[in-house]
Amino acid sequence: MTGKIRLIKKMIVMKKLLMMFVMSTKKWIPEWEEKMNLKSGGFSIREMKTRWGSCNQRTHKLLFNLELAKKPQPCIEYVVVHELAHIVSKNHDTQFKAVLDKHLPLWEKYKNELNEFII
C-alpha cells in the first residue's frame, strides 16, 4: 500500500470520527443545558494543544479540541458537562465541583481516563 493510499484512508477515518463527534456534541449540549438549566452560546471545534475544551466567560461559547473525536464517548460527554459548568463558575472551585458532582457523579473517573491520553 502506498503512502498516498494510507493517507487517504486515514483522512476518511478522521472525517467519520469528526462527523460522529459533531453529531454527539450537537445532541449532548442541548440535553445537558436542559438538565443543568444553563444555556451556552453555541460551540465550535478546532485543534488545541493543551486543553480538551474551553468556555468563553462573556459569550458562553464552548470550544472543543478536535482530538476529542478519538476519545471514548463518556469522556467527550464529561468535557461537555465540564465546559457547561464553567458558565456557573469560572474557576475549578468548590461551586464548580459541586455542579459536576450533582450532574455527573462519575466525572472524576472520566477526567482521569481522559488525562491518560496525551493531547
Image (cartoon, rainbow, N blue to C red):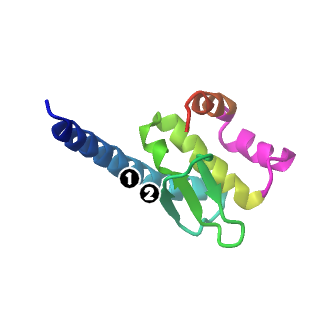
The amino acid sitting under disc 2 is Lys
Outermost residue on the bottom side: it is: 59
Report crowding for label 1: few under 14, some 14 to 19, many 20 or more residues within 10 A (C-alpha).
Answer: few
Q: Residue at x 65, y 39 (%)?
A: 104
Q: Residue furthest right?
A: 94
Residue 82, horizontal then vertical, whole percent: 66, 47
Image height of 65 relative to 105, above or below? below
Instruction: From the top left corner, tell me how far across and down residue 50 is, in percent.
Output: 62, 46
| Secondary structure of residue under mark 1 | helix
85 vs 81, left or right, is: right
Which residue is label 1 attached to? 23
**Image quarter for residue 39?**
bottom right
Which quadrant would the C terminus be assigned to in this image?
A: top right
Q: Residue at x 48, y 57 (%)?
A: 46
In the rendered image, residue 98 lying in the magenta stretch gets the answer yes
Q: Nearer the viewer, residue 97 or 92?
A: 92
Decide if residue 75 is on the left or right side of residue 3: right
The residue indicated by pointer 2 is 26
Marks 1 and 2, how far apart in space? 5 Å
Whether the magenta-drawn stretch holds residue 102 is answered as: yes
Q: Position of residue 60 (x, y in %)?
A: 65, 67
Whether tag 1 and tag 2 are in contact, CB under 8 A, the answer is yes
Stretch of the chain drawn in magenta: 89-107
Q: Which residue is farthest left?
A: 1
Residue 23 image position (x, y, % from top left)? 38, 53
**Dot 2: within a 10 Å radius of its alpha carbon, few (fewer than 14), some, or many (20 or more) residues?**
few
- Is residue 3 rendered to the left or right of residue 109? left
Residue 80: image tag = none
**Residue type at numbered disc 1:** Met
State the residue in front, 25 or 8.
Answer: 8
